[in-house]
Image: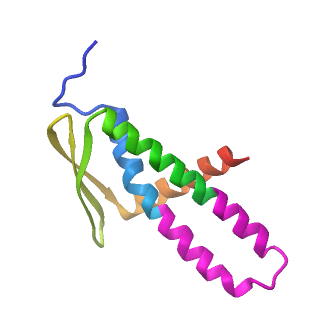
Amino acid sequence: MSVNPSIETEEDIQIIKDYTLLPILLDMLARDMDTLKMYQDKIVFRHVIFYLREVEDSIYSKLQSIKSKMIQQNIKVLSTEMNAQGIQVEYKVRGYVHHFNMLRSLIKAELMTMLMNLRRQIR
């Protein structure tokens, strides 16, 4: 069964979504770890930072895997634009240009889901 090159699959869309959202999650983790530095003298600080670094490492690993899939499946992100409403992504799948939009509320929900899934993987 061959895939129509002009139509992106659910897997293609998920790859684009993960590729777009994981860097945002990394930025959020970095911001939060920086904020937590004011609690360095607290007992749980090292434990929380250790956990957050594990999550960060798993995100980098997942991003590397996604980039490999993108190369294999001929997927390329052309542009990503963040604005007050959310994110707009323009990408190319097997030579055909597509667009992807996510509202801020959906981005927040997706990031929380990703974070929970990463937490399960680390255990």
Who is closer to the viewer here, 102 or 29?
29
Q: Count the numbered circles shown.
A: 0
Q: Residue at x 53, y 48 (%)?
A: 61
Q: Specify the farthest residue to the right.
A: 43
Residue 73 included in the magenta stretch of the image: no
- Residue 123 position within the rendered picture, expressed as x and y whole percent measured from the top left: 74, 47
Q: Which residue is depicted at the point 38% across and 45% down? A: 67
Q: Image quadrant of residue 85?
A: bottom left
Q: Main secondary structure of the magenta part?
A: helix
Is the N terminus in the top left, top right, bottom left or bottom right quadrant?
A: top left
Residue in the picture at 35% in, 33% down = 10
Residue ranking furthest to the top:
1
User: Start and end of the magenta stretch?
Assistant: 25-54
**Left or right: residue 101 compared with residue 6:** right
Q: Who is closer to the viewer here, 13 or 102? A: 13
Estimate the x, y position of residue 47 in percent, counting from the top left: 78, 67
- 6 to the left or right of 20: left
Q: Position of residue 31 (x, y in %)?
A: 54, 76
Q: Is residue 41 magenta?
A: yes
